[in-house]
Amino acid sequence: MNSAKNTIPTDLLARLMLTDAAEIASWRANADQQAMLPKIELGAEFPIMEPFSWPVEVDSIYTHEYRFSDTLALEIARQLSDDTSISVGPPMLAALDVVAYTGAVQRFFEYDAMHQPPIKPITDFWIAIASARHDLEEGERPFAITAIGGDEYWSNIHVSGSFDQVTQGIKQWIVRETNEYTPEPPHTERDRVDAGRVFLVNVSTAARRLIGRAQAMGIKIVENEFVIA
């Protein structure tokens, strides 16, 4: 009889993530709290953000046991948020939001299955979010107020694939977004749409590092699942 299971407890997750259980508990507390907050309409005085989807597996919310997909979501977020001494990414909770929004874990699993054996420069899987700043048109604001104020709003797109596919997708979106929403001359500064920011994350790198640490700890991963005796 096979007694192996596909999940690991919080203490083992902490060792695998090179952190401690208290830090993981803080991420969980925020995730659980957001999951319980009611949603309200955009444009309200204090809009509530959509909850981020971590842990990825619903069962983890109740058991505090984590699958490989949950752990990979954390690894991607840590890679996105970590201080490199040159620049600092978004806070960990915001990084988890990015991972959930892009569907990074499931998209990586699907992509990886089609590219074996991997050739890193060509087949590494990337997730990106591109954002543009828009001037608000006359009339009622259809979007929630952000830190940039009440006169502008963001539009966003997420793309995934190889590095070449991602960068090409971002370029095409920026051109399309700018051309569609910026009127022909003459137009004023209030009519502009400008590319504002791009996040790029190599999901394959996160997966390789995570799998390497797991193997060093004697944890097997088979078909994107932990196999624990």
Image: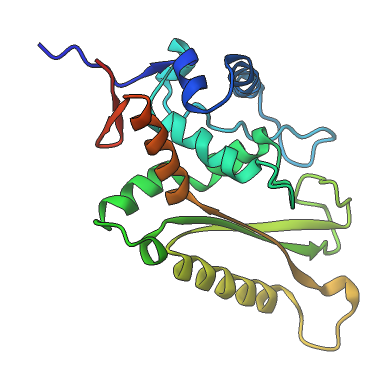
Q: Is residue 178 left or right of residue 80?
A: right
The residue sitting at 42% across, 56% down in the picture is: 125
Residue furthest out toward the left: 1
Q: Please, which colouring scheme is shown?
A: rainbow
For residue 113, above or below residue 21: below
The residue sitting at 72% across, 32% down in the picture is: 48
Q: Nearer the viewer, residue 137 or 22?
A: 22
x, y percentage for residue 106? 39, 43
Q: Is residue 96 left or right of residue 135?
A: left
For residue 207, above or below residue 69: below
Number of numbered tags placed on the structure image? 0
Residue furthest out toward the front: 216
Q: Is residue 152 left or right of residue 3?
A: right
The residue sitting at 47% across, 21% down in the picture is: 13
x, y percentage for residue 66? 42, 21
Q: Quadrant of residue 68?
A: top left
The image quadrant where one finds the C terminus is top left
The image quadrant where one finds the N terminus is top left
Q: Nearer the viewer, residue 147 or 229?
A: 229
The residue sitting at 65% across, 41% down in the picture is: 82
x, y percentage for residue 93? 66, 33
x, y percentage for residue 142? 75, 51
Q: Quadrant of residue 37?
A: top right
Q: Nearer the viewer, residue 123 or 220?
A: 220
Q: Is residue 149 left or right of residue 194?
A: right
